Image (cartoon, rainbow, N blue to C red):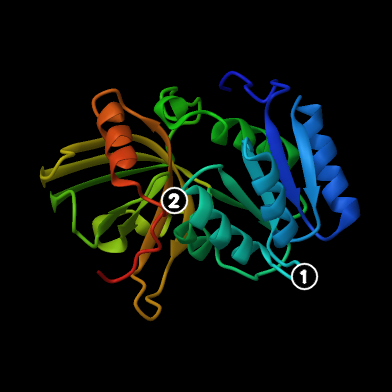
């Protein structure tokens, strides 16, 4: 596992949830990491806390809350602060799809009750600067390899890059039927034109869409976990310069 940068008393995390017992439990867990926490009972209080402290490093928010739900909290936050701080949705209900959440700018979506080890590792990952986040190759080996060639890097609906991963359409994945959620996959993409010509590394499947829905293409969203040195700095620089707000695009028809 990467260096546990959660062991830093300066790290400040906002926990927004209308269930006081659950909120206190999440706050306690984050404090066990060595972090400071601020509690909020809804999205409006969460945004007020962000405006008060400003030096917030991470936000963890329920989706279903009174007055302002998590969705509005995220929208209003991003208007003010851009893509920082990282924002984790947590929910025990199907109030929002994971692909809508990541497309709206959330950095992750986790289900209640929380898997504490996964939650801790996710927190450490999101607290790592993007310039370092994908440098270390994980121990997990890919279950499926995705290899594809594209005409161009920008403007191809079959590949849509976000600031934390990408959407790739089903037609580019011969092994699509083998994919499962939360699965480690190998990535080997080549682009004939554009600012990025190679994309190699490892990822994790965030979601899989088996059927076309309205203007959404069939395919999957994949988080970056590791980027090969041949492309790491190029991809990171591109993401920074593009000011992308979507963590993983949901695969809309362009």
Question: Does residue 8 appear to the left or right of 241 in the view shown?
Answer: right
Quarter of the image where the N terminus is located: top right
Quarter of the image where the C terminus is located: bottom left
* Disc 1: which residue: 66
Badge number at residue 165:
none
Percent from the top left, x then y, of residue 108? 56, 49
Q: Earlier in the sequence, mark 2 or mark 1?
A: 1
Asked whether residue 187 appears in the rendered view, the answer is no
- Quadrant in the rendering for residue 17: bottom right
Residue at 56% from the left image edge and 43% from the top image edge: 86
Would you say the residues marked 2 and 1 are in contact, meaning their CB atoms lie under 8 Å apart?
A: no
* Disc 2: which residue: 247
Which one is in front, 98 or 243?
Answer: 243
Q: Nearer the viewer, mark 2 or mark 1?
A: 1
Residue at 81% from the left image edge and 58% from the top image edge: 41
Question: Does residue 168 appear to the left or right of 120 in the view shown?
Answer: left
Percent from the top left, x then y, of residue 24? 87, 45
Percent from the top left, x then y, of residue 176? 36, 57
Vertical placement of residue 173 versus 96, above or below: above
Which one is in front, 101 or 113?
Answer: 101
Question: Does residue 105 appear to the left or right of 1 in the view shown?
Answer: left
Percent from the top left, x then y, of residue 19? 86, 59
């Amino acid at each position: 596992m990467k260096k546990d940068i959660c062991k830093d008393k300066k790290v400040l995390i906002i926990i927004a949830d209308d269930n006081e017992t659950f909120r206190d439990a999440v706050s306690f867990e984050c404090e066990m990491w060595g972090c400071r926490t601020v509690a909020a009972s809804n999205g409006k209080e969460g945004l007020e806390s962000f405006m008060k402290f400003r030096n917030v490093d991470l936000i963890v928010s329920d989706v279903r809350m009174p007055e302002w739900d998590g969705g509005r909290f995220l929208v209003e936050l991003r208007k003010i602060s851009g893509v920082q701080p990282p924002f984790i949705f947590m929910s025990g209900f199907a109030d929002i799809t994971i692909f809508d959440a990541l497309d709206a700018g959330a950095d992750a979506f986790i289900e209640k009750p929380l898997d504490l080890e996964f939650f801790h590792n996710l927190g450490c990952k999101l607290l790592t600067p993007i310039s370092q986040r994908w440098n270390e190759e994980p121990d997990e080996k890919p279950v499926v390899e995705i290899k594809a060639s594209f005409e161009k890097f920008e403007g191809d609906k079959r590949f849509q890059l976000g600031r934390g991963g990408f959407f790739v359409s089903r037609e580019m994945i011969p092994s699509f039927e083998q994919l499962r959620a939360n699965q480690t996959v190998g990535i080997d993409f080549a682009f004939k034109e554009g600012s990025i010509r190679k994309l190699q590394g490892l990822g994790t499947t965030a979601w899989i869409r088996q059927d076309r829905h309205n203007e959404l293409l069939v395919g999957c969203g994949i988080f970056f976990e590791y980027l090969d040195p041949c492309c790491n700095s190029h991809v990171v620089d591109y993401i920074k310069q593009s000011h992308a707000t979507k963590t993983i695009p949901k695969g809309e028809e362009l």
